[in-house]
Image (cartoon, rainbow, N blue to C red):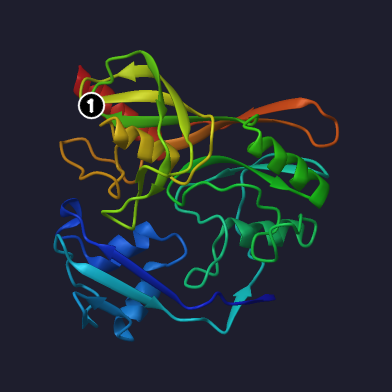
Amino acid sequence: MTEIAGRAPEILEFTVPADMEGIRLDKVLAEAYDGLSRSYIQKLFADGRITVNGAVTEEKKTSASAGDEVVISVPEPRRLHLEAEDIPLDIVYEDDSVIVVNKPAGMVVHPAPGSPSGTLVNALLYRYGDRLSSINGVIRPGIVHRIDKDTSGLLMVARNDLAHESLSRQLAEHSITRKYTAIVRDNIKEDEGTVEGPIGRDPKNRLRNAVVEGGKPAVTHYRVLERFGSHTLIEAVLETGRTHQIRVHMTYIRHPLLGDTLYAAQTGSITAPRQMLHAGTLGFVHPISAEYMEFTAPLPEDFRKTLEKLRRARR
């Protein structure tokens, strides 16, 4: 077991948007913050650490209303206990320098107060022990980049600091190949396109990011793979790597991801258990051999089933 000093006390503030009205607040917060589990949020309710419109509420089933001002006081934890856990991993490739893992949807990449276990890091520690890079500290051993909790697909992990520095440099230079498969709402008329818009915190909803003036530069390329009339299957290629980039950019052009309840209200007869986003292709230059390597991961079962529903509905 590894003990890690906790983060400083944190105050989270946001205004509930219209498309989140009626949703339980504990569910909204758990979906918005990967590091806060639903059970931990419910404890914050019970401890009186969540206020709505200035009033403390201890009712975890409280429903959100549009315009509500919510403040969450996340206390400073004394220690975060980080344990190695025997969690199965889908290892696509590994050597003494690099690991490529196919992360399932629903798994958080690294621990945080409120979700200290069940993460990719817990699983990596069990399998590799201290044979991971240390550049990102004890809480993120080997982690070079991350994908959202409810996004499935490929991640690269560094076994040593030399590999970590090489992979991080490639990310900064935008030379890493990162291709995603996504299902978006409505029919995209163009066969391909590019979305270019700076990304920062959404001023209307602090749970989300958005294309905003003064945000960090972000570029996403896309091409249509299949059309369903009500939805479109696309391949999205990241030129940059901002938080929620594909989700934000596709929402910006009015084609939010199917199943992405954070960025768009989900309507219609076709539903999905999560945002339909899969990191299917990952390519980079190996830190030691200097050979370009590219890996692919097949669509997971929930994604394939959703595609089957769309194809049946199209007939």
The quadrant of the image that shows the C terminus is top left
Mark 1: which secondary structure?
A: loop
Quarter holding residue 170:
top right
**Compared with residue 40, is residue 245 higher up or lower down, i.e. above or below?**
above
From this view, report whether residue 200 is shown above or below residue 87. Answer: above
Above or below for 186 versus 139: above
**Is residue 49 rendered to the left or right of residue 134?**
left
Left or right side of 225 for 288 = right
Instruction: Identify the residue under disc 1.
Output: 186
Name the amino acid type tagged 1: Asp
Q: Position of residue 36 (x, y in %)?
A: 43, 67
Q: Judge whether 169 appears above or below 192 on screen.
A: below
Q: Residue furthest front?
A: 214
**Rendered residue at 30%/85% (across/down):** 48
Which residue lies at the image location 82% right of the left edge and 47% below the top edge? 162
Q: How far across and how far down the image is residue 190, in percent?
A: 32, 14
Asked whether 88 or 181 is in front, the reply is: 181
x 33%, y 28%: residue:
307
**Could you say where residue 117 lies in the image, as x and y percent from the top left?**
55, 67
- In the image, taking residue 77 as reference, residue 173 lies left or right, namely right
Q: Nearer the viewer, residue 100 or 308?
A: 100
Q: Residue 262, how many percent across, how many down?
A: 30, 50
Tell me if mark 1 has few (under 14), some (14-19) or many (20+) residues whose alpha carbon lies within 10 angstroms of its own: some
From this viewpoint, is residue 168 visible?
A: yes
User: Is residue 117 left or right of 83 when viewed as pictured?
Assistant: left
Residue 257 showing in the rendered view: no
Q: How many marks?
A: 1
Of residues 49 and 258, the one drawn nearer to the viewer in this rendering: 49
The quarter of the rendered structure image containing the N terminus is bottom right
